[in-house]
């Protein structure tokens, strides 16, 4: 049984929040690709979009939290819902932060690493997409979500592997200065962190599912 079955308005707001999460990862992918391609106007447009999305997500999260408290909705699940919202919001914030760091620090990324950064971004975005799918499933039927979490863990692992591979390539490129290598590693870590935050949400979903099966 859906944990939001008692209020359609809350269900709709949660769905909108998850839509924003999906959209933020798509804009992130576009932003990384446009930055690496040197398309500055398009990159800045992506950055502006994700900043607005993050702001919308924050406002929507606060509205949902307020509704959970003021209308005393789903009291048996309220704590879990609040923690889940906070963790998903961290994903949106991280997506925005990645593009913001590119805009602020303007890293020089040699062309030989472009495909690696794009692949890493895709793996991290896929982990987020899968955790959104798992969250939607959890809201509908909390007891039948554990099997869908495996895809989140798979893509988080793939992001880890891709990040490690990229960092090894960077530090084995003799023509780069050490400071350049550190800078390139820093951005790989930022992108990888988005997949880690998706894994955090998956871990919470796994715990909440176990709680409801006892």
Image: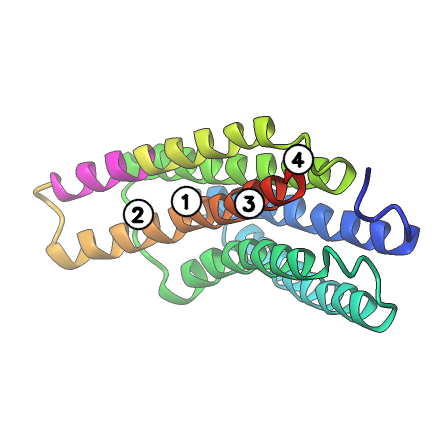
Residue of label 3: 207
The magenta stretch is 162-172
CA separation in Å, label 3 and label 4: 17 Å
Magenta stretch encompasses residue 87: no
CA separation in Å, label 2 and label 1: 7 Å
Specify which label sits upstream in the sequence, 4 or 1.
1
**Residue occupying the point 73% across, 53% down:** 17
Q: Secondary structure at mark 1?
A: helix
Residue of label 2: 109
CA separation in Å, label 2 and label 3: 40 Å
**Residue occupying the point 52% across, 48% down:** 31
Specify which label sits upstream in the sequence, 3 or 4.
4
Q: Quadrant of the C terminus?
A: top right
CA separation in Å, label 2 and label 4: 33 Å
| Neighbourhood count class around disc 3 (C-alpha, 10 Å): few under 14, some 14–19, many 20 upward | few
For the residue pair 101 and 198, the one nearer the viewer reads as: 198
* Mark in front: 3 vs 1: 3
Residue of label 1: 36
Residue of label 4: 133
Instruction: Point out the residue furthest to the left here.
Output: 174
Specify which label sits upstream in the sequence, 3 or 1.
1
Please identify the dominant SS of the magenta region. Answer: helix
**Which of the 4 image quadrants contains residue 115?**
top left
- Position of 18 with respect to 110 (left or right) is right
Measured along the vertical axis of the image, is residue 21 above or below residue 142? below
The spot of residue 91 in percent (x, y) is 54, 53
CA separation in Å, label 4 and label 1: 29 Å
**Residue occupying the point 54% across, 59% down:** 90
> How many numbered marks have been drawn onto this rendered protein structure?
4
Q: Quadrant of the N terminus?
A: top right
């Amino acid at each position: 049984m859906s944990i939001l079955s008692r209020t359609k308005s809350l269900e709709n707001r949660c769905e909108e929040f998850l839509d924003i999460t999906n959209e933020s990862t798509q804009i992130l992918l576009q932003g990384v690709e446009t930055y690496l391609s040197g398309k500055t106007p398009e990159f800045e447009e992506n950055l502006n979009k994700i900043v607005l999305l993050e702001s919308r997500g924050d406002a929507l999260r606060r509205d949902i939290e307020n509704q959970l408290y003021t209308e005393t909705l789903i009291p048996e699940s309220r704590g879990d819902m609040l923690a889940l919202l906070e963790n998903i919001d961290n994903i949106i914030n991280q997506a925005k932060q990645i593009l913001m760091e590119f805009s602020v620090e303007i890293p020089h990324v040699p062309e030989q690493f472009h495909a690696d950064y794009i692949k890493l971004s895709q793996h991290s975005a896929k982990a987020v997409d899968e955790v959104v799918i798992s969250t939607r499933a959890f809201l509908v039927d909390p007891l039948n979500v554990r099997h869908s979490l495996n895809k989140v863990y798979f893509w988080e692992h793939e992001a880890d592997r891709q990040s490690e591979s990229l960092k090894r390539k960077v530090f084995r490129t003799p023509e780069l200065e050490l400071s350049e290598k550190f800078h390139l590693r820093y951005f790989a870590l930022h992108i990888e962190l988005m997949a880690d935050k998706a894994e955090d949400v998956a871990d919470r979903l796994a715990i909440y599912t176990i709680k409801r099966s006892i």
